[in-house]
């Protein structure tokens, strides 16, 4: 089996080094460490519902998502995680696809599996969009894929200007917003409220990250482009979203207390981690607005640090060297609970110096 090069490779690392999962702090996977209350109750309800097929059109699920986003449910297509939405979308796109790097590798992998030619574009050295570079390459692609906030750099920015540029040129913008809920003032950056106005816009979201439920596997795509969404439904396999995922969405989107508490926690914790990480010698810390932080090593390389942290400290981080545009100087760490974050920071101080 080929390695896909993602985080959360806990099983392979444990097998390699003879570790037990109970003792591993996994900073390689960017998941909210806190989950909504009563999830066990909602899962049990889903178990009772699992004796029947889910609604093949997911009307109730789509309406719950629509109410959460204040959108018509007909603009929404659910999937088995954001990954299914990405792969479905690539089945219906035509023309060449621009991807702004460094970013999540599944965009390119999904495109290539559908014989779509990739045009590689790059953020600037501070991981901000290079609008001049995009303008200079407009004739090379039909659609543009941007992750916002971006993985692995953590930066978020307004994409309204690029949306307007692409609209005027009759080009399509795809935005992965799976980490957007972590952003404290996300309403300044999300494009969800522009879905009705722009039919050249497609947004990808999921419950995986923010609601801390990666194993439930629920993502969804949003667009007012009837042609795109109808073609995706034509390609979509039936019943890919299970009863557990469908049922919990009757509850978690309405949990305003959890949502507000999570946003407040990550605002404070991101600032805490960046401040303390900046005190460590031999690393450069990039500003982040979401639940992970990109670090550049000025001493040692990513594979050495990953191995040393895992073997000596039972801490797993993400080697970011396989992101296109990065190299062996880069690692990515998640933002977790305070005591876990302190353990990571102390371990890095010990290895790299203060």
Image: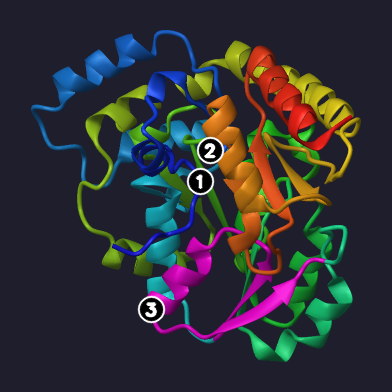
- As drawn, which residue projects farthest toward the left? 51
Q: Are discs 2 and 1 less than 8 Å apart at CB?
A: yes
Task: Tell me the mark number nearer the camera, choosing from 3 and 2.
Answer: 2
| Residue at image mark 2 | 29
Task: Tell me the mark number nearer the camera, choosing from 1 and 3.
Answer: 1
Q: Residue 187, located in which quarter of the rendered image?
A: top right
Instruction: Report whether residue 216 is seen.
Output: yes
Question: Residue at horizontal 83%, vertical 64%?
Answer: 161
Q: Which residue occupies the foreground of this view, 244 or 110? A: 110
Question: Residue at horizontal 49%, vertical 27%?
Answer: 212
N-terminal label among 2 and 1: 1
The image position of residue 195, as x and y in percent, is 62, 54
In the depicted structure, whether residue 113 falls above or below residue 88: below
Residue 214 placement, left or right of 264: left
Residue 122 painted magenta = yes
Q: Range of the magenta residues?
A: 96-123
């Amino acid at each position: 089996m080929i390695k896909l090069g993602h985080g959360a490779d806990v099983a392979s690392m444990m097998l390699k080094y003879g570790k037990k999962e109970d003792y591993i702090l996994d900073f390689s996977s960017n998941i909210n460490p806190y989950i909504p209350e009563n999830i066990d109750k909602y899962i049990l309800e889903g178990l009772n519902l699992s004796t029947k097929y889910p609604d093949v059109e997911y009307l109730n699920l789509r309406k719950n998502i629509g109410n959460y986003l204040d959108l018509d449910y007909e603009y929404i297509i659910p999937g088995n995680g954001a990954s299914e939405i990405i792969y479905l979308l690539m089945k219906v796109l035509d023309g060449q696809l621009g991807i702004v790097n460094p970013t999540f590798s599944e965009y390119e992998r999904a495109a290539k599996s559908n014989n779509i030619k990739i045009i590689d574009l790059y953020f600037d050295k501070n991981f901000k969009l290079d609008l001049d570079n995009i303008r200079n390459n407009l004739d090379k692609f039909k659609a543009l894929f941007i992750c916002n906030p971006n993985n692995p750099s953590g930066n978020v920015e307004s994409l309204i200007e690029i949306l307007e540029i692409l609209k005027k040129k009759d080009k399509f913008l795809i935005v992965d917003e799976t980490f957007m809920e972590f952003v404290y003032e996300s309403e300044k950056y999300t494009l969800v409220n522009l879905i009705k106005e722009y039919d050249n816009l497609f947004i990808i979201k999921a419950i995986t990250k923010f609601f801390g439920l990666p194993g439930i596997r629920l993502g969804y795509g949003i667009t007012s482009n009837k042609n795109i969404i109808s073609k995706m439904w034509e390609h979509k396999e039936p019943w890919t979203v299970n009863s557990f995922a469908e049922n919990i969405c009757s509850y978690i989107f309405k949990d305003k207390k959890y949502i507000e508490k999570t946003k407040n926690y990550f605002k404070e914790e991101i600032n805490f981690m960046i401040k303390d990480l900046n005190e460590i010698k031999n690393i450069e810390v990039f500003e982040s607005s979401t639940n992970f932080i990109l670090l550049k090593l000025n001493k040692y390389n990513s594979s050495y640090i990953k191995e040393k942290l895992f073997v000596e400290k039972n801490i797993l981080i993400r080697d970011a060297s396989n992101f296109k545009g990065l190299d062996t100087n880069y690692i990515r760490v998640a933002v977790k609970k305070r005591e876990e974050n302190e353990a990571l920071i102390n371990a890095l101080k010990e290895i790299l110096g203060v």
